[in-house]
Amino acid sequence: MSVKKLLDLTGKVALITGGSRGLGLQIAEALGEMGARLALTARKADELEQAKSALAGQHIEALPAVCDLARPEAIGPMVERVLGHYGRIDILVNNAGATWGAPAEDYPLEAWQKLVNLNLTGTFLVTQAVGKRSMIPNRYGRIVNVASVAGLRGNPPGTMKTLAYNTTKGGLVNFTRALAGEWGEYNITVNAIAPGFFPSKMTAGPLESFGHKVIERTPLGRLGDDQDLKGVALLLASDASRHITGQIIAVDGGSSSV
């Protein structure tokens, strides 16, 4: 099989959570360009419509599906809507997530629970629903979890105080490994991308405070941009990665290696 064929997603259906902007939209553009039909979820209908219009300008089909993944009761109906529209889900990109900064000793319980509910429980419930209703019966699936380098280590002194974020992203890292061990028998691969700092709504505050330090500590001397996740996301979503599962790939300019 040619490399082009291995990377071709024509006929595949990809569900991308948190797909209306930022890293999720970047991944959507990559998968759509390679032929995938997309379903995007997010909490805000207007942002989903903007994403749909932007993708349509690139001749990419996208179904918007408003869903707050922090509400467990909303997840099943969202998955059913996507399945009702496309008939199957071949690729799941778990990108939706949130952060919250506060010193550990004063960290609000409400904030801790919010991040656990969205970053971990929401991801689990979407994955469970897609696996049970489509991937396992079809004996095919590519699951790509968007973790973070914050899930691979703590934060350097003088930077972020994001205990719940680091904890939930670390949980997502081992969620990836454990699920890969369970679902390999169904021809489902489960991998994760661990991005470093990318300019976004979520990282605007921290980058303003210490972005220069991040760049200084990064071997490639730069932040991520709106192209840097596309290649690895395509690899893990395609048949080019059919013998890769349970792996975590950092996309951070080398910052986690030094």
Image (tube, helix red, strand yellow):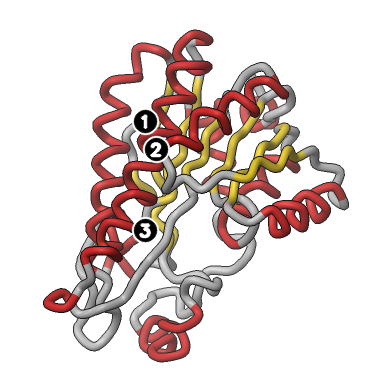
Instruction: Give the image location of residue 159, x and y in percent.
Output: 28, 83
Is the residue 178 above or below the residue 49 in the image?
A: above
* Mark 1 Cα shell of 10 Å, populated few (<14), some (14-19), many (≥20): many
Residue 61 shown left or right of residue 100 in the figure: right
* Mark 2 Cα shell of 10 Å, populated few (<14), some (14-19), many (≥20): many
Quadrant (top left/top right/bottom left/bottom right) for the N terminus: top right
* Mark 3 Cα shell of 10 Å, populated few (<14), some (14-19), many (≥20): many
Q: Nearer the viewer, residue 215 or 57?
A: 57
Instruction: Give the image location of residue 175, x and y in percent.
Output: 28, 38
Is the residue 20 above or below the residue 40 in the image?
A: below
Point 50% across, 28% down: residue: 76
Instruction: Give the image location of residue 56, x and y in percent.
Output: 85, 47
As drawn, the label of residue 148 is 3
Q: Nearer the viewer, residue 94 or 98?
A: 98
Tell me which amino acid carries mark 2.
Answer: Asn
Which numbered disc, 2 or 3, marks the residue that appears first in the sequence? 3
Instruction: Give the image location of residue 166, x and y in percent.
Output: 26, 62
Q: Which residue is mark 2?
A: 191
Tell me which amino acid carries mark 3.
Answer: Ser
Secondary structure of the residue carrying tag 3 is loop
Residue 184 shown left or right of residue 69 in the figure: left
Point 20% across, 73% down: residue: 107
Tell me which amino acid carries mark 1.
Answer: Thr
As drawn, the label of residue 245 is 1
Is the residue 43 above or below the residue 132 in the image?
A: below
Point 45% across, 35% down: residue: 73
